Image (cartoon, rainbow, N blue to C red):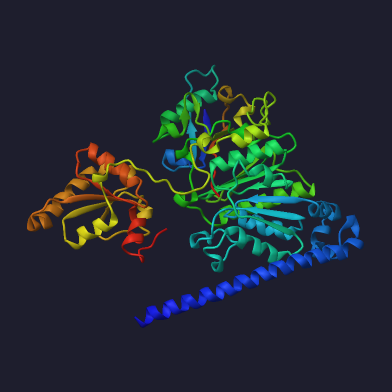
Amino acid sequence: MKLTLEFGGGLELLCDSVKIHNVDVDQKDVEEKLTMKDLLVWVGKNLIKERPEMFMKGDTVRPGVLVLVNDCDWELSGQLDTLLEEKDVVVFISTLHGG
Amino acid sequence: MAGSEEESRIIREMESLNESKRKIDDEIRVLQARLLQIRQNNHSSKTYGNNLPAHHIYRYSRHLLLPSFGVEGQANLLNSSVLVVGAGGLGSPALLYLAACGLGRLGIVDHDVVELNNLHRQIIHSEAYIGRPKVESAAAACRSINSTTQIVEYKEALRATNALEIMSKYDVILDATDNAPSRYMISDCCVVLGKPLVSGAAVGLEGQLTVYNYNGGPCYRCLFPTPPPTTACQRCSDSGVLGVVPGIIGCLQALEAVKISAKVGDPLSGRMLLLDAMSARIRIVKIRGRSPQCEACGDTSPLTRQQFQKFDYESFTQSPLSTTPLKLKLLPGDARISSTEFNKKIKDAEPYVLVDVRPSHHYKIVSLPRSLNIPLSSLEDRLPEISSALKKEQECRGLESGRGTALYVVCRRGNDSQRAVEYLHKMGFSTAKDIIGGLESWTFDIDPNFPTY
């Protein structure tokens, strides 16, 4: 499944400072749809190069990270259970506090 | 010698002139306030569209000409008040626009003083105000733009103990602060008081903006019920910030505050604006609504005034309300050396290797002579370089002096250098010592001309 993954607010530093990743996530089973939960595992394995605790906590993202699926907060689409589709855009953004 | 005499004479003269200027400024301020009162009294008898006084018609004519804004919008602004918390990178442009737009009252809260390294982004301040409170500087700029808006100064840090009293006097609050505990505190206070909050943030080349607690929309805690780890909170003083980035977010904050105060348009509630300056992209995303389980604004047990005043925001977020840099103490005294002692070792021509563990882009700004840059993040992989540097130094200078080669570690402020020495001790470099207070202490104690940043 082809997806666009974007990292911002400093999270890009965890994946070689690259913000936009066009990826092809292999599905174990075509019948079974890819969920955000599956994607987080995939991202942890394939994109996060350092300090994984700055991205994940338990089986979800750490506090202070907003997850947006097609420009929409994943809280509105079922969080970890959100079903992903071909060409979806998933954004991981760390909230900023500076000014 | 004549040069330094001349220098101190000029400094003395400037100080005395500045003192006189300050007195004159104070007198002007008193006169301005009186003038404002007289004008308001004069105009109260004769008003025009939506009770706007005559001088407002001309001053704000371009607002009045906007069909979607008009006299109604302007009259709403005049009857409205906005509090800006933080007169820094975000607050500077926000305050300039808010002072200009025709509000009834504009409050400014900040406890900090103006510093030279603020000026590239905090555009409301100027060189003449270096060392003076940001609130004084910002208030003077606002008054010089518009003598008809009442400007209120709060030269103090906003805390849970004074926030209710200060914020209750305003209709709209702007969060232009720079740290996590302040953001939770300001949002909670807005929930308790039922005020809309225009929240902006900027670090590096990115910015974020949204409106909380507006018309049944979410508050900060609905989005972020659990505070982030302190290591995830980047600060402008560590990560850097391109001046215009907070400028853009601050302008957008002013825009949202004007829209809410004038009761026009569609405020950015339930949505968030994300600015990525490097790729010139602005994205507006939909965020969750108010959470019924929210600990601040939720249905079950909404936050009370008493709970708010007692809440410890610093321990909740594990970070201080003010942004004083961290001062770690990881090492015992015999594993550390002051910059004065280190300077003496250099003078005595003792053999040493100095490792600078700052990131390479910091090292490029300024560094001590004869230092070896190995950033903390790559220390693990580059230990052999330290071993060979020690060996080389011992061969060159250790043999002739008959002494062993010392290993010193330095960074910007003396925190990372301790982390590095802790690691080096573990890896067998048992004599490694860190320079207490880093390069900042070198400037402070040894060479005032060595640049700090």
Placement of A64 over or under B385, stated as above or below: above
Tell me residue B88's x, y (percent): 57, 55
Most extreme residue toward the bottom is B2
Tell me residue B436's x, y (percent): 31, 51
Can the viewer see residue B285?
Answer: no
Can the viewer see residue B219?
Answer: yes
Quadrant of the image occupied by residue B99: bottom right
Tell me residue B340's x, y (percent): 27, 58
Q: Is residue B111 left or right of residue B68?
A: left
Tell me residue B306's x, y (percent): 65, 33
Quadrant of the image occupied by residue B450: bottom left
Residue appearing at x 55%, y 20% in the figure: A33
Q: Quadrant of the N terminus of chain B?
A: bottom left
Placement of A84 over or under B274, stated as above or below: above
Residue appearing at x 25%, y 59% in the figure: B343
Q: Quadrant of the C terminus of chain B?
A: bottom left
Q: Is residue B182 left or right of residue B451?
A: right
> Total label count?
0
Question: Foreground residue, A79 or B229?
Answer: B229
Question: Foreground residue, A97 or B148?
Answer: B148
